[in-house]
Amino acid sequence: MKTTSELTDFYYKTLFPTLETLEEDRKKLRQKIIKVGVFYTFIVVLLSLVFLSSHINFDIIVFLLFAYIGIGLFIYKMLIKDYTKDFKHSVIEPLIKEIDRNLSYTPELCVREHTFTRSKLYKKHIDRFRGNDYVRGTIDGIDIEFSDIHAEYRSKNSKNKSWHTIFQGLFIVSDFHKHFKGETIVLPDNAQSTFGDLIGNWLQSNNFARDELVKMDNPEFEKEFVVYSNDQVEARYVLTHTLMQRLLIFKKRSGHPLGVSFIGGNIYIAIEYNKDLFEPSIFHSLLKYKIAMEYVSTLHLAIGIIEELKLNQKIWSKQ
Amino acid sequence: MSTPLIILIVLAIILVLMYNSLVAKKNQVDNIFASVDTQLKKRYDLIPNLVASVSKYMEHEKSILQEVTKLRADANKPNISDKQKIALDAQVTSALGSIMIAVENYPELKANENVMHLQSSLNEVEEQISAARRAYNQAVTDYNNAIEMIPTNFMANIMNYREKEVFVISEGERTNVDVKELFN
């Protein structure tokens, strides 16, 4: 697979003419957004002054503020719609093809909700499930799919309903190279890092929402993750010393909380970025190194998972 | 309710919890040892095929083949203790490792489909045994901790629970076992 520096080269060299055109569009769009924003704010302020002059009420002010933000976001999304489409088509798609020709990219689709639920990484009931930037294909004979996902649940109190994020980030599904029947879930170790080893461990072993706690024989891995499984032996068959080491490296590289599960012959990986990935930047230049690196490294990380975790090593009986 | 009665009830609950946790830990060790046993049996079943496939070629390694056959026969004897099983496993691992290294010196063996299949089967069993051993060692550690630590050690003493041994593999043997590296 191509290295991140090779891909950054590709981004700047091969995509340069496209980036230049897009950069021009971006500048124009930015101007337009600022103009529309100022005009929209002016109208809202004017209308508010007319209405609120007679009866000032805290609830109405809050309502107006929410309406202002909501409608503003809607206008913003409408304004950037075409530009986003162009950007994904002319930057993200060529980057993916450059990494591997066998991958297909559909900006509007995402990994299916039932695939996400099947991973059992998040137990909360999902009320709203969205996503985009769906990539699917085969690398070295290994099926892989990933996309941006945003899963939320709704809470209701006496006054209003509000949405809460269950997971937002990159969700990857791939074949795993070993036969296994059980279910093994690896989650970030929040309990032990918050409450210390003794109480944290006690809390983890009494987590009734999960299967049995599996204590792993790698102190560094134990510090970062907590493992639950319905089969103590199989959990260790799947999580070998080498794989634990590789997952630690992968976590360090991604720099974000990581959840991994092994279910039904697949490996599911959820990386919490807490933002929508692969979206074009509107207020920063596309030619900025930091911006380019973000697209390149995120794609490299997702597609590189097969090489990184050596999922393509079919030295086991699973052919 | 009087205070002494409350103390008595709390004490009884603590004792029951301690007793149950010790029994659960002991059963966990036995349960996981059964998995180790199953995997070891799988490996012993592969040995005759392996010996049959390679013995024609391996004139110089006859002694290792004989040793591994003898170890298999010992392991299949009835009524051997868990301790003996652990010791035999270490020896078989080492002997199989030596055979696998020796296979490397015979190009015709390396290319033989039967041997290749055996290698990958052994490789997988080896990986499963390693997983079962690790699970067993963790269960034994939890159990040993419980029978050594205060206050469960008093209860364990009354119950006549004794420390159990873990699987120990020397670094040298570990390299031999790492058959998968040879196949890459």
Image (cartoon, grey):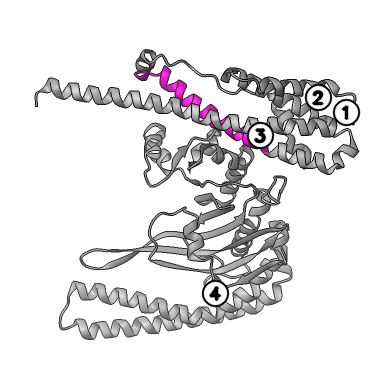
Alpha carbons under labels 2 and 4: distance apart: 61 Å
Q: Is residue A160 rendered magenta in the image?
A: no
Which chain is home to disc 1? B
Q: In front of the other: label 4 or label 1?
A: 1
Which residue is located at x 52 percent, y 50 percent? A261
Residue at screen point 53% across, 60% down = A170
Q: Chain of mark 3?
A: B
Subunit ID for the residue under disc 4:
A
Direction from residue B23 to residue B171 in the image, left or right:
right
Whichever of callouts 1 and 2 sits on the residue coming sooner in the sequence is 1
- The amino acid type found where label 2 is placed reads Leu
Q: Amino acid at mark 1?
A: Met
Which mark is on residue B65? 2
Q: Kindly identify which numbered label has been placed on residue A108.
A: 4
Where are the magenta residues, as a range? B125-153
Label 1 environment density (alpha carbons within 10 Å; few <14, some 14–19, many ≥20): some
Residue on which the image places disc 1: B58
Task: Give left or right: position of A171 versus A175.
Answer: left
What is the distance, in whole Å, between disc 2 and disc 3 at their CAs?
18 Å
- Most extreme residue toward the left is B1
Label 4 – label 3 distance at C-alpha: 49 Å
Callouts 1 and 2 in the same chain: yes
Q: Are marks 1 and 2 in contact (CB under 8 Å)?
A: yes
**Alpha carbon of mark 1 to alpha carbon of mark 3: how far?**
24 Å
Q: In the figure, B177 relative to A175: above or below? A: above
Could you confirm whether marks 2 and 4 are on the same chain? Answer: no
* Closer to us: A138 or B28: B28
Q: Residue beneath label 3, please?
A: B42
